[in-house]
Amino acid sequence: MGKELKTNAMRMLEKLKIPFTINTYECEEFVDGISIAEKLGQPPEQSFKTLVAQGKSGGYFVFVLPVAQELDLKKAAASVGEKSVALIHVKDINRVTGYIRGGCTPIGMKKAYPTVVDQTAARFDTIIISGGRIGAQILLAPDDLLRAVGGKYADLLLLQA
């Protein structure tokens, strides 16, 4: 693996001795997770996106959920003990996380924020998350993701009619 490919997330997983696989693909700019999953022939329910929200208290929180699903802000707030949370603006992603849109992963952010992974992840042996830059994915066991970020599972999904 070339040095230019290693991201903070990958270095952190190696340091923690957590097994993971890297998958790369050609992509110059942000493309949504559903399109990437389809392009690579991956099940969208096994591909997870990382969203960052700010709570009423001012703290930041990380939520990881399937790419084809929407975050239920009330469930998200309850999962972290906040009255409410709101997703941060796209322009703030790099400042808060150290990553860019499309390359944001819950592992190895600038600071360790409370992280909640949607409980559907536990159904899979392996889930797919961003690798820390556009064009890179990390495949790992969901329990290993929780261990890497000190996170927990919760129901985060907006029920779709």
Image (tube, helix red, strand yellow):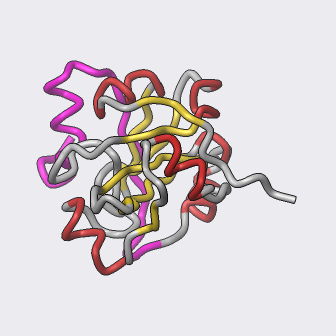
Residue at 20% across / 49% down in the picture? Answer: 7
Rendered location of residue 23, percent (x, y):
41, 44
Residue 39 visible at all: no
Task: Give left or right: position of 155 versus 111.
Answer: right
Q: Is residue 13 above or below residue 25?
A: above
Rendered location of residue 113, percent (x, y):
27, 46
Rendered location of residue 87, percent (x, y):
44, 67
Residue at 38% across / 77% down in the picture? Answer: 89
Q: Tell me the quadrant of the picture where the N terminus can be found.
A: top left
Stretch in magenta: 1-30
Observer-nearest of 44 and 72: 72
Q: Is residue 8 magenta?
A: yes
Observer-nearest of 40 and 110: 110
State how many labels appear: 0
Residue at 43% across / 50% down in the picture? Answer: 82
Q: Is residue 127 above or below residue 66?
A: above
Task: Give left or right: position of 45 versus 11.
Answer: right
Rendered location of residue 64, percent (x, y):
48, 46
**Residue at the limit of the structure toward the right, as seen here:** 161
Query: Looking at the rendering, which quadrant does residue 55 occupy?
Result: bottom left
Observer-nearest of 94 and 28: 94
Residue at 38% across / 62% down in the picture? Answer: 56
Q: Is residue 92 above or below residue 103?
A: below
Observer-nearest of 153 and 140: 153
Query: Looking at the rendering, which quadrant does residue 115 occupy?
Result: top left
Task: Give left or right: position of 109 versus 144.
Answer: left
Task: Give left or right: position of 100 versus 84.
Answer: left
Q: Tell me the quadrant of the picture where the C terminus can be found.
A: bottom right
Residue 75 visible at all: yes
Q: Is residue 96 magenta?
A: no
Query: Looking at the rendering, which quadrant does residue 101 occupy?
Result: bottom left
